[in-house]
Amino acid sequence: MTNYFLFVSGGELVLVMLLALLFFGSKAIPDIARTIGKGMREFKKATNEIQREIDSYTSDISKDINDVTSTVKNEVNSYTSDISKNMNDVTSTVKDEVNNYTSEVKNNVNEVTKTVETETNEIGKAVNDKYQD
């Protein structure tokens, strides 16, 4: 299998080098190579500068996003703790009210029970007295 570098074979590369040597001469080729090297270096430098600018802008955006995220989390935690406190207050109030009503109902049931027992005893005595006579 033949290896190709950018769809150019070895023979084609040799032909291009010979044509460059013929057109520019042996003295001009190092200058051309130096100029191409400088151009590549400038291109790489420009690419690195663009990358640094992108990184600096994205770091600012990332910092802003982190600030907003922490602010939202703090607000949510604040509201959550307020809601939790209010729920605890309501729960304790409801429990207290239920306990009060429960104790009132127990007291009323005890009073009714005593009244029924008293009335039952009185009726029992009246019946016993009636039958003993």
Image (cartoon, helix red, strand yellow):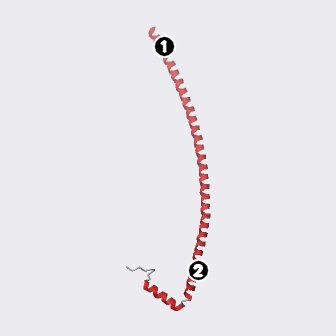
Residue farthest front in this picture: 27
Whichever of callouts 2 and 1 sits on the residue coming sooner in the sequence is 2
Q: Quadrant of residue 96?
A: top right
Badge nearest the viewer, 2 or 1:
2
Look at mark 2 in the image and give the residue it sits on.
38
Image position, residue 31 (x, y; %)? 57, 85
Is 116 placed above or below 25 here?
A: above
Of the pair 89 and 62, the residue shown nearer to us? 62
Image position, residue 86 (x, y; %)? 60, 43
> Mark 2, residues whose alpha carbon is within 10 Å: few (<14), some, or many (≥20)?
few
Which residue is at a point 58% across and 74% down the rendered structure image? 47
Is 99 placed above or below 33 here?
A: above
Of the pair 107 and 90, the residue shown nearer to us? 90
> Mark 1, residues whose alpha carbon is within 10 Å: few (<14), some, or many (≥20)?
few
Q: Quadrant of residue 107?
A: top right
Q: Amino acid at mark 1?
A: Lys
